[in-house]
Image (cartoon, helix red, strand yellow):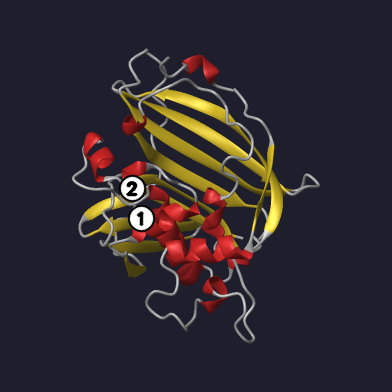
Amino acid sequence: MPINPDSVGAEGEEGEFSWTSKDSLLYSLGVGAGVSDPTGAELDFTTENSIDVTQKALPTMVVVLGQGAGKGPDFGDFDLTALVHGGQSITLHETLPPEGTARSKSRVANIFDKGKAAIVVLEGTVTDTSGNPLWSTKTSLFIRGEGGWGGDRGPASTAAAPDRAADEVVSYTTRTDQALLYRLNGDRNPLHSDPQFAALAGFPKPILHGLCTWGFTGRALLHAVCDSDPSKFGSMEGRFSTPVMPGEQLDIHIWNEDDGVIFQTKVGDNVVLDAGQMTVR
């Protein structure tokens, strides 16, 4: 059956999951940590046994934790080749440790009708095993060919890049095999690895995971805005606007505003992560 607009409010099953020091190291490597200087400033994210260095986890890793922990909410069926990641937000209530155990649950927060597509908004909440909140997420799934039932189109984004030069630009070059490395964090969607599947989705070759671009961007914000201290990383949200190909350079433009940080990630002149906002804890 197609997307079910009446599934708004549907909840998934609560599930328990754990992550290890190795998981944190793999995620950090998957979003480029240590590439430019393997023995430099990011050792606390890429090693667990360096002298006088305490391992830390990148805050954006929360987007890959808990996958498969409890059955997600049912909102219908659709062609996987029509699905792209539309947007993502995270809010950290505590500093993410490099290893731990937690419980998660998700719900369908909304479904919007974009005419030729549908947007399904999923909200996730994660607590420790005692019920204390750890982090929350909101994920927007853009599904081509599933709109047109006359439903609410949804709100327009209010975040826009200021009309001035960025206060800082951080640039990272992705690896040509970045998607193959990042997929080891759990997202095995063949769109990012299988040339034939990518062609069915209309791409000349496998594209980089949107959440990999997200992770690179989060690294830039962590170092530029939070002095590389994960305990200062509060929230981050943005909308994916253009696919990234492995090997391309990401330029993260950062503006410091009175009420937080606005950011935009580009490849050349093309905006690939838009409407970016961040808060510091």
Is 243 rendered above or below residue 259?
A: above
Q: Residue furthest bottom?
A: 51
Residue drawn at x 26%, y 35% as measured from the top left: 201
In depth, the one of 193 and 175 nearer the eye is 193
What mark, if any, has residue 7 been given in the picture? Answer: none
Q: Is residue 209 left or right of residue 205?
A: right
Amino acid identity at mark 1: Ala
Residue drawn at x 42%, y 24% as measured from the top left: 112
x and y percentages locating residue 42 in the rendered image: 50, 76
Q: Secondary structure at mark 1?
A: helix
Q: Is residue 95 left or right of residue 59?
A: right
The picture quadrant where one finds residue 179 is bottom left
Asked if residue 151 shows in the view, the reply is yes
What mark, if any, has residue 192 been given in the picture? Answer: 2
x and y percentages locating residue 240 in the rendered image: 35, 45
Q: Secondary structure at mark 2?
A: helix
Is 37 rendered above or below residue 24?
A: below
x and y percentages locating residue 141 in the rendered image: 42, 34
Is 249 rendered above or below residue 19?
A: below
Q: Is residue 119 left or right of residue 249?
A: right
x and y percentages locating residue 277 in the rendered image: 45, 52
Residue, disc 1: 179
